[in-house]
Amino acid sequence: QAQLVQSGGGVVQPGRSLRLSCAASGFSLSGYAMHWVRQAPGKGLEWVAVISYDGSRQYYADYVKGRFTISRDNSKNTLFLQMNSLGADDTAVFYCARGWSFWGGFDIWGQGTVVIVSS
Amino acid sequence: DVQMTQSPSSLSASVGDRVTITCRATQGISNYLAWYQQKPGKVPKLVIYDATTLQSGVPSRFSGSGSGTDFTLTISSLQPEDVATYYCQKYNSAPWTFGQGTRVEIK
């Protein structure tokens, strides 16, 4: 059964960094574009970033550009999100999601990981 | 960037009612549109893709229509397990923008 298992969330102080991980099982990550999506408490879904199947292309939402970096290690079947200069507005549940193609929607989602930015 | 606007923001309907949610894009996106269902405290789930195609395993009471700028998600006979927030999403170009969501409740 194809699934995504996330790790790496937690409480972090403003201005600090955090790295999220998303491990694929039941399928090979190397065949798919992968995304990060976040959801602030009580709010809607907000797309964060995408990386192509081979890591050659990345796109970011304007509000994370220059602060967040999406990457992948296909040999370890794992996706990452490096988040720097975190602020209170970054407090959210972060989801990784599989794109069925680069210009496609998301057919499998991780369980979500909570990131709380607070002093 | 293309913006996605859903209406209504919330609705309350009776079991068995036909429910319609609309999603409008500020520019044409052909049929590059998905609908997701997110039940309270749960992970989003793909319901419809390519504007009209039902995802495997999703009940046939869900259907999607539209192309270009105007899209619709319809639940033909609302069931208690359909209580959720529904989001549309475009995926023809970056960013992969979501609508603001429509919360569906049982009256």
Image (cartoon, grey):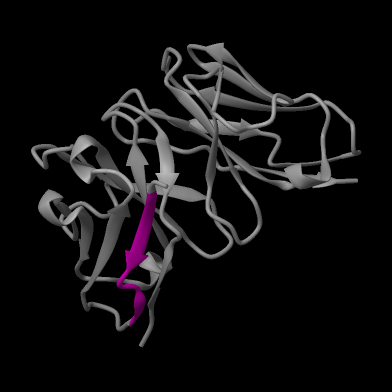
Residue at x 42%, y 47% (from the top left corner)? A1
Prevailing secondary structure of the magenta residues: strand
| Left or right, A92 with reference to B51 | left
Residue A119 location (% of width, % of height) = 35, 88
Q: Is residue B63 left or right of residue A7?
A: right
Residue occupying the point 91% across, 46% down: B107
Which residue is found at the position 22% from the left and 78% from the top? Answer: A16
Asked if the magenta segment contains residue B34, the reply would be: no
Magenta-tinted stretch: A3-11
Q: Position of residue A100 (x, y in %)?
A: 34, 31
Q: Is residue A117 above or below residue A46?
A: below
The residue nearer to you, when weighing A16 against B53, is: B53
Q: Is residue A9 magenta?
A: yes
Q: Position of residue A113 (x, y in %)?
A: 41, 67
Relative depth, front residue between A13 and B79: B79
Relative vertical location of residue A117 with respect to residue A97 in this rendering, above or below? below
Residue B86, position as x, y percentages in the image: 62, 40
> Residue at position x 34%, y 23% from top?
B92
User: Horizontally, is B94 left or right of B88 in the view?
Assistant: left
**Position above or below: B59 against A74:** above
Q: Residue furthest bottom?
A: A119
**Number of numbered tags placed on the structure image:** 0
Q: Is residue A61 visible?
A: no
Farthest residue, direction left: A56
